[in-house]
Every structure is written in C-alpha cells, then in structure tokens.
Amino acid sequence: MVSLGPAVLGLRRDARILKLPPYLSALCILVGVVWLLLLPLNDYSRQTYVSENALLPGQVHTYFGGSEHNVFRAYRHEVHSLVDKPNEERVTKLQEIFRSAGLKVATQKYGYEIGGRSIKGENVYAVLQGPRADATEAIVLVAAWRNMNGEINHSGVALMLTLARYFKRWSLWSKDIIFLIPQDSTAGPQAWVDAYHDAQAGPAVEPLSLKSGALQGAIAVDYPAGPWGHRFEKLHIHYDGIDGQLPNLDLFNTAVSIASGQTGIGCTIQRMYKHDDSYKDRLQTMLRGMVNQGLGHATGPHSSFIPYHIDAITLQTVGSGWHDEMTLGKTVESLTRSLNNLLEHLHQSFFFYLLMQANRFVSIGTYLPSAMLVAANFSITAIALWVQSGRPPKPAAKPFSTDSKDEGVEPEMTLVKEGDMTALVPASAFEIVERKLFLPVAFVCATHFLGLIPLYLFNRVSESALYPTFFLTALLTPALPLLGAYPFVTSLRPTLQHLHLIQCFSLLLLGLFLSALATLNFSLAFLVGLAAAPLSFVRPVPGKPRIALAAALVLSLVGPGLLLCVVGRPWLPSEALGGLLKGAVEAWAVNHAWTLQVVVWLVWWPAWVEGAAVLAVSGFVEAD
Amino acid sequence: MLLHVRFLLSFLCLFFSQVILASSSDYHERLLLRPLPQNALLASFNFRSNESLSSFEQQNFRYLPRSVGQILQHAHTKELHLRFSFGRWDAESWGARPWNGAREGGTGVELWAWVEAETDGEANARWLTLTNALSGLFCASLNFIDSTKTIRPVEIFQPEGNHQDANLHLLHGALPHEVVCTENLTPFLKLLPCKGKAGISSLLDGHKLFDASWQTMSIDVRPVCPTDGGECIIEIEQTVDMVLDIDRSKRPRDNPIPRPVKIEDITCDTSKPYSSQDSCYPLDHVLEPSWSVAEIFGRPLKGACPLTAAEGDESETVCLNVPPERDVEVRTQGYHAQRMREGGFLRCYELPTGEDFDLFLAEQSLETTIPLPQSPLYATRSIVGHGQERGGVQAVITNPSDAAVDLAYLESLPWFMKPYLHTLKATITPTSDNSSYTHPIKETYYRPAVDRRRGTHLELLLTIPPASTLTLSYDFDKAILRYTEYPPDANRGFDVAPAVIRLLSSSGEESPKGVYVRTTSLLLPLPTPDFSMPYNVIILTSTVMALGFGSIFNILVRRFVGADEVEKRGLAGLKGVLQGKIGRWRARFGGKGAKEL
C-alpha cells in the first residue's frame, strides 16, 4: 500500500494513461451496444410469469355468450347508427343504454388548445357499483369512440355496453367497475383521468360529477369492426405509457395468459404480427419497444392512466382469423374477474422491463448496464479533459537526458531537499496551471438555457408553422457555431484551456443527465446517448481555422437533426416528420409528457451546440 | 280450529305476562318491506325491548340480554350505539335513508357511547373495557379501537336517552376496514328473545343478508324516563336494514351463476330496422317483478314471536309498503290479519304463531308508484391528487331542498394522514349574492393528531344555501410508517373512516335521534416499502445460519473413529444390534432381581 500510492500518483503524469480515455470511451459504447444486442438471447432474457397469486388468470369459467351475442349485435347497430349523428345525440344514446342496464351515468366535456388547433370532445362513463364493494376501489374498462387510427370503434363500444349489462347481474364484484367511452383515444382518457384526480388542466376540462374509489387497473378495447363484424386473428397488446412508464408486468402477463391459455387467442406486441421467435424478431420487437418508450407518447387510451400509477393496457384486434367478439368479450370478462380478485394494488411484478415477445422479457437489472455504460463514456472523457486542462502546455522533454544534442537547451532545474535527501527536479514539474473557470461555466450555462428557446417555440407556434420552425432550427444549429466562432474569439479571446473546460463541463453534464434518465426512461437515455456518442471524440484543432470549420460542419451534418431534415427528406413521407412533431407537441400539451422534449432541447441539443462550437472556435485559437 | 289456536295463544300470552310480571309490550318487533326502484327491495327489521332501571341495576335481566347488560354495568356505560355496515345507500334512486340515517353506521364498524367517569383518564379506561368486552361479544375487532382511533365529538352526536348524571363522556371510534360478516350476525341474533327461531328474525340468514347491496346492523341502548316522572327504563333497540337486489336474491342457492338468459326470455325491440333473429335490442322491464318473502330471504317466516303483543298495533309485525293496486297473496296455514294504513300504501300483517307465513307478489304493471321521501342531502367524498407524498380530500355536499340547511360535519382521520387546516376551503356553487352564505363554515372544532397517539378530529358547523352544492377540500401529507406498522396487505392502502354529517334543523324541533348522512370510506395509499426485500434477506441469512450452525453442530457432537474401528455392518451388524438389545434387557431385569435378592 505504501508503495502503491506514489506509483498511482506517478501514473497521473504518464503520457500513456492520458492517451487511454478515448479508447476507454469507445469501449464503453461498444460494450453497451453489444450488451443490448445480447439481451434477446435465451440466456439473458426470461420467460414471463405471474407473480401476484391473487390474480389467478384464466381460473374462472366465463359465461359471456348466448343471448348476450344477440344484444351485442343490436348494440353494434346502434353504435353504427350514431356515427354521423351530432355529438349530443351520441352522448344521450350511450347514456340511455347504460342507464337501462341499471348503472349510474355521467358525462364530461373537455377541450384543449394546441398550436391554434382545438381538441374538443365529451366523455361518457358509467359506474357499476359493485355489490361487494364499498366505493374504495374501482376498475376501468375503456373503449374509445375513435381509436388511435381515427376509426370508429364500433365493436369495442358495443362490447362495453353489452358487458355493462352482463356484469350488472353478477354479485361477486368487490370493486366498482367504471365503463368509460371517451370521444378520442388520447385527449379524452387524459381529461377523464386528470379530472378523476382533480388535476385537470384549466376550466376547459370539466370536473367529474360521479366518482368511485381508487383506480386499480384499466383495460382498453380497440375493435373497430363495423356493424357486420369482422373476425380477427390476434390480439395486439399495447402497454407503453406516457414518458415511457410501463404498467406492472403482472397485468400484461395476465392478459397474455388469459388470451392464449383460456380463450386461445395469440398475442403480439409492437406491431410484430409475424413473430417466429427468432433472434432477429426478438431484437426487432425490443428495439421497437425502446423507440416507443423513448418517444414517450400515448400509444392507446390506456397510456394516460399509467402516470397516475394505474396499471393499464389496450387490447387491439388485428388480422383476419376466426376469433369473434364473444371470444374477446370472454377475455375481457376473465381479465376483469382476475383484477376483481386483487387484494392489493398490483405491486408484485416488474415495473421496468423490455419485452421481446409476448412471453419473454428482460428486467431492469439485466438491461440497465448498457445505458449506464453509454452514459459513463461521457463522464470518462470529461474527466480526461479536466486532467488535460490542468496540465502545463508543454511537457518537460527528457529532463535528465545526458544527450549532448540537448546541451543548448538546458532545462531549468530546482533543488529539492527533504530531510537528508536532495534531488534536482525540473522546474516545470512544479508549475501550477490555474484553471480559469468563469468563461467555460458561463458558456455552458448559457447554451443550456438557450435550449429553452426551441422548447418554448415548439410548444407555442401554430401547427402550420411547426415544420418551418423545425427546418429553421435544424439549419441554425450548425450555423450558430460556424458563424459565431470568429466573433466569439475576437471578443472574448478564449484559450485552448477554456475550450477543454467547455467540452469537459458539457460532457460531464451529459453523462450525469443520461445516467439519471436511464433509471426513469431507459430507452430514451440509451438512444440519446448513442446519438451524442461522436461528441466524446471531438478534440479542438488549434490554429487551423479551415480544418476546424470543416470539421464543425461535418459534425453538424451528421447531427441527427439536420440529417433527418435534409438527407431524410427524400425518403421520409412528408407527413411522418410533421406527424412526429405534432405528436410531440400534443403529448406535451395534453398528456403532460415531458421527458422527450426536455431531454432533446435541454440535454442533447446544448451538448451538440457546445461540441460544434468548441470545434469551430478552436481553429482561431493559437496552439500554445 | 283457528279459534282454538287463538284462544290458546291468548291464554299463553296471559300466562307469560303473569309469570314474568311485565306488560306484554316490553318487546316489540317490526319488519318493513319496501320495493325500491331498479329491482331493489328494502327490508327494515326493528327489535325493541325494555327493562326497568331498578331491575337492570339488580341484574334482573329479562328482555335485555344479560351479556350486554353486564358489559354496560361493568364499563359504566349509560348509552351505547354500535353499528355494523357495508355497501352504499343510493340516495339518488332510493330516496331518504331508513330511520333518517339515525340507525346507520359508516362502512365497517362504528361505536359511540356515553361513559360515566370522574376524569378523562377514567373514561378512557372504561372505554377500553367496553370495546374489549364488545369485541368478544360480537366477534369483531372492536379491541382495535385504541387511542389513535378514538375521538370525543362535540356537536355531531347528542344523547338519545334521558340522563341525570353530569359526568358523562362521549367517546367515538370507527373501524372502516372491518368486514362485516356472518360471525357478527350470529351473536346479534342471540341477543333477541326469539333468537331467530320465530318472528321476523327467522328471516335473517347470513347468505342473503351479506349478499345485499347495502346492509347495516345496529344496537342502541339508552335510558328512557317518562315525562310524567314514572320509573325510568333501559331500552335496547336492534335494527337490521338492508337493500336486496330482487333478481340476485331470487336465484337459487345451488345455482347462483347469472348465466345469460334464453333469448326467448328477453323482450326485444322489434321496431328497430336491424331487428332480426340474431340481433335483439333489449327493452326495459316495465312490469314490477314478482317476488315472495320466502324466495327473497331463502326461507319463509316462521310465525310470530310469542313475546310480541297479541293484539293492537304492536301485534302487526310485518308491513309492506306497496301501492294499493298491487296484488299481494298471503300464504299461510295459520290465522293472520291484514290492515291497510296510510291510504292503502302500507299493509300490515298480524302473524300466525307456529305456522309459516309468506307473502307473494306476482308480476304486475302498476300505474302508481310509492312516494319515496327525498334525501335531505347528498354527500360524496373522495381522495384527489396522486403520488406518495401528499394528497387532498374533497367532499361534495348537495342540498337539494328549497331551504338553507345547517349541518355538523365530522372527520376522524388516522394520525398518518396529516391535514393542513389552512388549506381547508369551502366553496358554494352556484355562488349567491347573499352575504350570509359567503362563509359557509360557521364554526370549527379541531384537535390535531399526535404521531402514534391520537388521530385528527375535525368538526365543522356548516350552512348550505337552498339548492346549492358545498365543496369542502383540504390537503394532507402522508406520513411514512415504520415497517412494523404496516398491515399484511400493505399495498392495499389504509382505510379512512367515513365522514359523518348531521342535519341541524333550524326550527329546534327535532327528534332526539337526529338526521344523519354518512359518506363512503376512503382508501389512502401510503408509500410502501418493498416487503419482499427483507423477506429475501431473512431467507438468505437463515439459510446461511442454518448451514453454518448445522455443520458446526455436526462437527461438535459427532464422534470420529477410525474406519477399521467400526463394527462390520450387514447380517453380523444386525445380529450385533439384537444381541446388544437383548443384553441390555437382561441387564435391566437381572439388575432388578439382584436388588430384590
């Protein structure tokens, strides 16, 4: 130990150590990516299982059928006849059907103003007061009038109406059951669940006149088959919540286990309708799941419930097969019975997981290191830059050389005495380099606050101006460092050390933010980390303005923003990008989804601007 | 034959009344059946018996059950109110509550009593005695009403009886999480003189009672002193009120599953354009459903309880509240009498003794409906906000009447729910210009909680203008409990007792029972640790300790010998063992013999 201390301290000045960080960073990124790619293998992922004993999926006999089918068909015709009718008539009719089943009915009007566009609608909901319930707990069954694709959810709504009538006759409900028919699939459920917790945004969203107890779970049904029905092949289960939050894995597992085990319907996730359980399909499912989680937007009516700690999923019918509405009804019946069995809020199983098939998952302990490694690479580079910024500009070259060639430039030596010992040490070893922190800190702070401008703009401009704003931002982002470099140098006269420190702080913040984010939204942290990876390897090129500007331009060009805008334009459908922007703005305004925009504009964008600025400015800085 | 029976009956009654030296009207019972909208049926049972104060003090119990009487005397309790309830009363469709809510409790168990004591400490000790004794009597966890769940209400409860003592302490406790079930019904029935064998109590069956949509059982003991200065009596009143779903109750017990009905049994709307063989838009039932007492309660009434009065109003123990045009068929072999009251809306029956009695109402379409009294108030309460740190409570009280009402509002909160009184807000909608309504809170009684000692007691006196809604809201913090303080189902959340609302009538002329409305209870989710983690640690450490202890113990007690020193096993070994055993026996007997010699 005694000999280790000086040896390690000596290593600090070893030139080989200082060369190591870029390789270490690259290794971190590489291991992180490979780690993720290993996850779909059998050895690293696990078969799903139901943790909560109370759920007993598929253990009850389902009786939904018989004359209920006739009633269902009639209700589906009723729903179809309401399609072109004004809103009031639709609401009145739905209320009437619920009321005739003996349920308590209420409505809620809601409205949101987003970028000059207004979203308006009215939710209808009915409460079945459980005979064994004391109004402390409730389950929500949702069928949005229009699904995510904007189609009328004929059979889904009709199924809710029929189930309400059927469930009323049972005396075993230990929780209230709320049947919710929102007018659309994102704003409606959000308005309702906000108002249920008295957290509605402004007077445009009405408070609820009828409430029940604490919501324990929500199941949404999306079955848009028209008045003459359509037999489906599989159930497509959506589970992504706002901001990448996920429902308890037990709820998902229960749905899969009931659908496949009891009613014989296959289940798919993440639009992987054909899944042959190969490595490639598993990886693709997982990556699609990560993209959805990273975007953090609503993927169905269930998404709005999840931030309130209400586990929720959407069952969507896909394909053409031989399963009919009664099979779906039985699935929902069995699922509701399972939730009704719950004694406690779902808490047994995982809340953080990646699914790669309907019955395979990896849990947070297994996948988290990959995002953490990617985030760590920035911290490593930041530490290396900090050490570098404290070094004297010119390392002492061979101080003890006896070579006669160096005789002319005799290094300045200092006599060091300690006890009886004396030694001659080059004076440069004692030189203290002071780090001038004000300019770097101010610059990094300013750039991060600058990110507030696009964040504000994107959520304020009207919808038509959204795409031009994006184009302008994408163009200005590389232009800003290029054009600003010369004025910056002439006015503030930054040194090379300043540039090192700017980059150091920028990467340090990036590493910090991303590792914190990895515990909240793993996918976003991983994807942003990868997108910012080049910043770790950018180094100032002092004294070479042309090379520096060109490098900054290249860095900006490979920046995904401009890449998406200029290079991706010919291939991407023009609506895709617009849709993404619109979706992000809507999610921000309606669903209170904050992670994506905050991370992009306040974490990733400033880091990118700082990286390009360091590169561009360095050309005008003299090499020491 | 009938005459004979009647003669015998009256003779018996006379005999009984002579033997027990009391008037036959010391025990009353009455059952009221009232069909409610949406196929519901209210069954309201009431049992009342009296005991003179002097015989009560001499422990001379007749109708008053000895078990209750002795508990009251031991705990110096002068007036007692005990409630077991579950479910919800649907005031919007069912109207006013039975007994104006005075015989109703909040979800779970509720208990309040006036205890005689010199000091607060003595009152608390006697209250503790009372709750523990009642807990044993009613098989309920009443002993969990400790100091954290006990409050001393100020305005909300007034004594129903006539008390002379000044040193009375009112204590109140509630257990909202307690599930009321058969084990509470059986002791309840045992307190009745006819014990569920005869009279209306013979209808009380656990299966049906606890399948009700709303159910409440109550026991009230109070001293009543006549105004003319006669001898005071102790009155015990027991009630059971329940709302049954007629369709659900009529299902046979061996086939309770509500399978989809046959398509022929559904009335379809054939006027719909799509109406066909396979599509059926169901029409509402326009007919009053058919039901009978035996069908609904699973058994017929086993005749009158012989202790009730033989004639007069008190002898009519079953009353049916249906419109006059409704056909009612009485099914009994014995003598019975029927009298119409209140313009034919109330039919009361005198029951036969010793013979089954049943009422049958056929399916019928009715022109008139029974007038249901409107509920004086509608009240709901819910938890708002989300997250593990704080939340809010919102109570919405609606006054549908044309007159302003004054009311007392009581909240008894557990200590781990810490309200901020400065956030207490009361708003009236629609807003009125009348300045007297701008501040609906007239008075506030507040006793803040002390961690792990006592809960919050909040009582408000409020005024709601006519046809308005009062929204009362406040914020609270959630405390973090010690891990041993969590119940086994920690993730369910914690129940918060319902709020109690009492109407204070402005005229001053009110019945001593009062008019009450209770909200539903709340479920409060608290931050919960991951309990499986310590469990895993316990398992792991136990395994390690067992391994370590096991091997060390093994090494310590085992005798190590060389392999060649071990006796050969096999036949010789068995032989050796047998020889050894025989040798031991021989030594024992031989030894004995030697001693005797």
Image (tube, coloured by chain):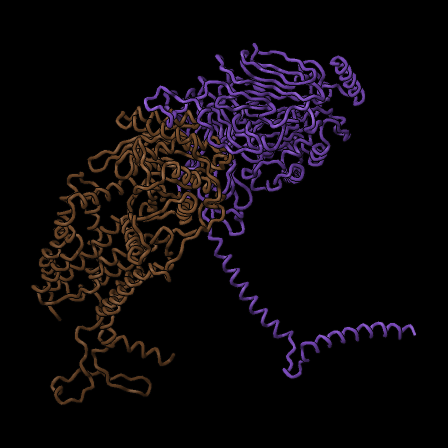
Chain colours: A brown, B purple
For this orientation, the residue located farthest to the front is B277
Residue B198 in sight here:
yes
Q: Is residue B50 left or right of residue A521?
A: right
Count of labels in the image: 0
Taking the spot 31% from the left edge, 30% from the top edge, the residue there is A122
Q: Position of residue A240 (x, y in %)?
A: 33, 47
Q: Quadrant of residue A105?
A: top left
Name the residue nearer the viewer: B157 or A120.
Answer: A120
Reply above or below: B235 against A543: above
Name the residue nearer the viewer: A448 or A103.
Answer: A103
Q: Position of residue B67 (x, y in %)?
A: 71, 34
Residue B192 in sight here:
no
Quadrant containing the N terminus of chain A is bottom left
Taking the spot 26% from the left edge, 43% from the top edge, the residue there is A588
Q: In which quarter of the image is residue B290?
A: top right
For this orientation, the residue located farthest to the right is B597
